Image (spheres, grey):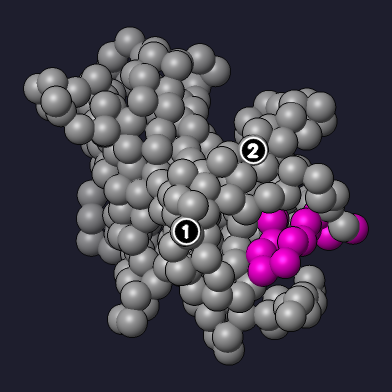
Amino acid sequence: MKTLIRPNSLRFLSPGSFARLNRFLLLPVLLAGAAFAFGPATASAAPGQRAAAPGHASPTPAGFNKYLVYMGESTVGPNEPGLFMDPINVGIFQHQVMQRSSLEVVQERQRAKVFFWQRFGLDFRSTQPDATGMEMIDGAMLVAFVQNPKANYRAYTIAEEAVPATGWMVRDGGWAVILTKDMLVGGSYGGANGKPVAAGAMVVFGDYNIKIENASTKARPHANETIVIHYESGFPIVANSDGVLTFQCALSHPTWGLGRARGVVEGKTIRNVLTFPPELP
């Protein structure tokens, strides 16, 4: 039986499940108006805390090419989305933050569709977006997203970079597929027989765009004061019975090569460790 989807209310999930995802799935894995695209110049110090020091570059762990740590301490309100999925905010991320042309955005969306098909057997290759930008197949929906900046998602450690104590803002966006009913998921993840995945699970394809907010004392292998890291879900993102989300994403960077992000979202906090390569031999 085909699941009824109401794009404006997203009532297809079990009561409260999408709300929990959208409020607390701060994806390491985006982000009203132009303010979200660039955010504040720096994060403010906590009460009683001194202003941020310039920072000291941490070494790269032996055997690795790069090592990063992101943290988020969300101030998203109870009636606010953790992820924006509207065309305006998504457009700001894709065009202003990622500096993509309209054609490049279309091409990137197609790359996402191919990934969702190959990795999870979710076939959106011939679907078209509706007026809201959503695409539907039986049991799943594809949306573009960008993280609400109130997630306060920031990179606090980047090996060989003098990151200040306030960190550097991580702009996070891309495309997601959300299951609208329990189903078997195939592709290279589930195999020929498929793996059971519950309604509300999400898989993602997108980019971390780190805004360099203070001058570093080290030479940087990136241009235009940003660091861009591409990510793709390794497995579905689902909350456990305690409401804790774990995620694992394959990463790629033009200089550092292939990597892995491994993270946890609990309540309004997120912790994410990124390494290049994913592990040592």
Mark 1–mark 2 contact, CB under 8 Å? no
- Residue at 36% x, 20% y is 257
Q: Which residues are magenta?
A: 131-143
- Residue at 53% x, 37% y is 207
Q: Is residue 154 above or below residue 23?
A: above
Q: Residue furthest left?
A: 62
- Magenta-span inclusion, residue 3: no
- Residue at 82% x, 30% y is 102
Asked if residue 60 lies left or right of residue 13, the reply is left
Asked if residue 133 lies left or right of residue 266, the reply is right
**Image spot of residue 248 (x, y percent):** 35, 49
Quarter of the image for residue 259 reads top left
Asked if residue 205 lies left or right of residue 137, the reply is left
Q: Amino acid at mark 2?
A: Val
Q: CA distance from mark 1 to mark 2?
A: 20 Å
Quadrant holding the N terminus: bottom right
Quarter of the image for residue 178 reads bottom right
| Label 1: how many Cα within 10 Å (few below 14, some 14–19, many 20+) | few
Q: Is residue 114 above or below residue 175?
A: above
| Label 2: how many Cα within 10 Å (few below 14, some 14–19, many 20+) | some
**Image spot of residue 14 (x, y percent):** 58, 85
Q: Dot 2 corresponds to which residue? A: 114
**Image spot of residue 168 (x, y percent):** 40, 38
Q: Nearer the viewer, mark 1 or mark 2?
A: 1
Q: Residue furthest bottom?
A: 15
Q: Residue furthest right?
A: 131
Q: Dot 1 corresponds to which residue? A: 193
Asked whether 95 or 192 is in front, the reply is: 192
User: Which numbered tag is attached to residue 111?
Assistant: none
- Element type at mark 1: loop
Q: Amino acid at mark 1?
A: Asn
**Image spot of residue 206 (x, y percent):** 56, 41
